[in-house]
Amino acid sequence: MTVVTDTTRSPFARLRPTPIAAVSLTDRFWQPHLERNQQRGIPQLYEELEAHGVLDNFRRLYGAHDGPRRGFLFTDSDLYKWMEGAALSLQTRRDARVEALLETAVAAVLPAQGADGYLNTWFVEERAAERWRRLETDHELYCAGHLFQAAVAWHRLDGDRRLLDCAIRFANLIDDTFRLGGRAGAPGHPEIEMALVELYRETGEGRYLALATHFLEASESITRPEISGHVVRALYFMAGATDAYLETGQYWPTIEAQWRDLTAHKVYITGSIGARYTAEALGNAYELPNERAYAETCASVASIFWQWRLLLATGRAVYTDWLERTLYNGFLAGVSLSGAEYFYMNPLACTGREETDPWYAWARKEPYQRQLWHDCTCCPPNAQRLLASLPGYFYTTSADGLWVHLYAASEATCQLENGRSVAIVQETDYPWRGEVTLHLSSDSEQPFDLHLRIPGWAGQATVLLNGVPLPGVSPGHYFTISGVRRQETVRLALEMPVERVVAHSALAGNRGAVAVQRGPLVYCLEGVDHQQHDARRLYLPADASFTVRHRPDLLDGVTTIMADGWEADDGERPLYQYLSLQQPPHFSPMPLTFIPYYAWANRGPSSMNVWVPLRSQ
């Protein structure tokens, strides 16, 4: 049974997973992304990994390739993430080409493992003596963790133990070295903690859970009330700590404190995280620059991992709301509509011109566009494995019934904890429209509870059971329908007004500006829709009225938002001037067209802006 996170027997989990294969997405929003991910993205990235020597790094260890090792010291993890994504994608749809590529990858990896279980293509030959010496910087345990996750995903696909046995041998060596052997150290780049807990869940071997908690407690982050430092490391660490909580009940005060700090002070409206290029770090409270946002795609993936585990622990809708915000905006912007090109960073404003500062140009590659390959290619396989697992995020079960977390046209069969089966057919055009119809049928007359998430963004929401309105519906919470029986029809109507969102006054760069949001989607202005004028110089009336229009011909089909606005032109205005002598800019009328943020930069280089300045008439 392949699930996103296996809390089936986790004592501190409120929710239990639904297998990925039990959910079939039939919608026009997510299903095309999943298809392109499997048919284009996964095969294309495999070819890139081959072309850049990542698989040959393994082959050279047993004489199947005679070239030098290529790439960064952590490239093993890129292949392991690709393998996990490929295995997860096969849960939704079997594909002979992907199966063959996955088999080739596994065949390249297995012979490279040492007799003692060690497996890493960097710390070999003259670097073999350096093993375990620089855990803070050298990603050894990080790479091992991604191997473990790939192994679990492949084992759950078909029961093939080859990669799982490889992972077990390596995990045993790590446990013998650190927890049992007394060697000091903790992962500089957390990831192995999540992987060890999932390996424990898959094998039932308690030493892996013990090793995960050993590494967590070796880090000062386990008691820190504020989240800080390298973004992906911090989020992976907290996701691993939450996994450990689900099994042991430990660490909740730190988990909750860091989550509050993150969501109150350090996250973009898109759900993206990461303010600083330097050290790929979070930054201080309210430090959220737009044009220089780091906002790495991997950080959005890590945030979704964490929010999901928090949801499994508590059943609280606030975690699902943040998961959804990140999924539809900060994460999805990192993947092209073609399914094969990726952003590393996801800024909230962009010039659309070539970057001249070499410090930023190394990564932004202005004019900013998604790419097939990044030399540091952590983000593409991370995006692929999340997309491949997405059906597993829609539904869970608990002791009292069935939970619906995300909305998309789909069909699913869920096994409740009492053994009964519930089939659910979801009809909706979400996220473009807020009407959802759920057809439920059960194999038993025994009643159960249905928990529907009412998104926090909803202006108003109504729920009808077999045509009868139900009272007490509140956005930002799960609404429980008790006593659902053999066959029921539930209709959910979510109001989707166009909202103008203002930022906290401490976000200096957003003062006097608004972001436009409708439903779960954050919108932006792009130069290509405005005669290639600079989107950062477009203004929205303070009393703007909006027109909503679905455009099936645009960007694979999007709902646009239109308003009358202005373009500012300062002409030859000085860089600075006395207020008493101020020459105000000239404003020209400009019809504004907002598109979903995730879809920007799919029509060539262009300026872009999320936070639009307001102008009074």
Image (cartoon, grey):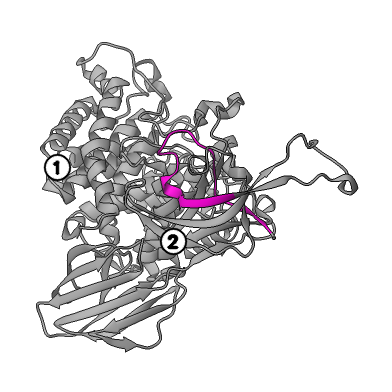
Please report the bounds of the magenta region as a residue range. Answer: 590-615
The residue that label 1 is drawn on is 161
Determine the secondary structure under disc 2: strand
Q: Quadrant of residue 80?
A: top left
Estimate the x, y position of residue 209 in percent, counting from the top left. Answer: 33, 53
Q: Residue at x 42, y 72 (%)?
A: 495
Front position in the image: 259 or 332: 332
Front position in the image: 571 or 106: 571
Q: Is residue 214 visible?
A: yes
Q: Residues within 10 Å of mark 2 (few under 14, many from 20)?
A: some
Residue 459 vertical placement versus 172 (above, below): below
Residue 608 vertical placement versus 363 (above, below): below
Estimate the x, y position of residue 419 in percent, counting from the top left. Answer: 14, 74
Q: Quadrant of residue 181?
A: top left
Estimate the x, y position of residue 40 in percent, counting from the top left. Answer: 24, 36
Q: Amino acid at mark 1?
A: Arg
Q: Quadrant of the C terminus?
A: bottom right
Q: Which mark is residue 548?
A: 2
- Residue 26: say if magenta: no
Residue projecting furthest to the top: 66
Front position in the image: 359 or 615: 615
Contact check, label 2 and label 1, Cβ < 8 Å: no
Determine the secondary structure under disc 1: loop
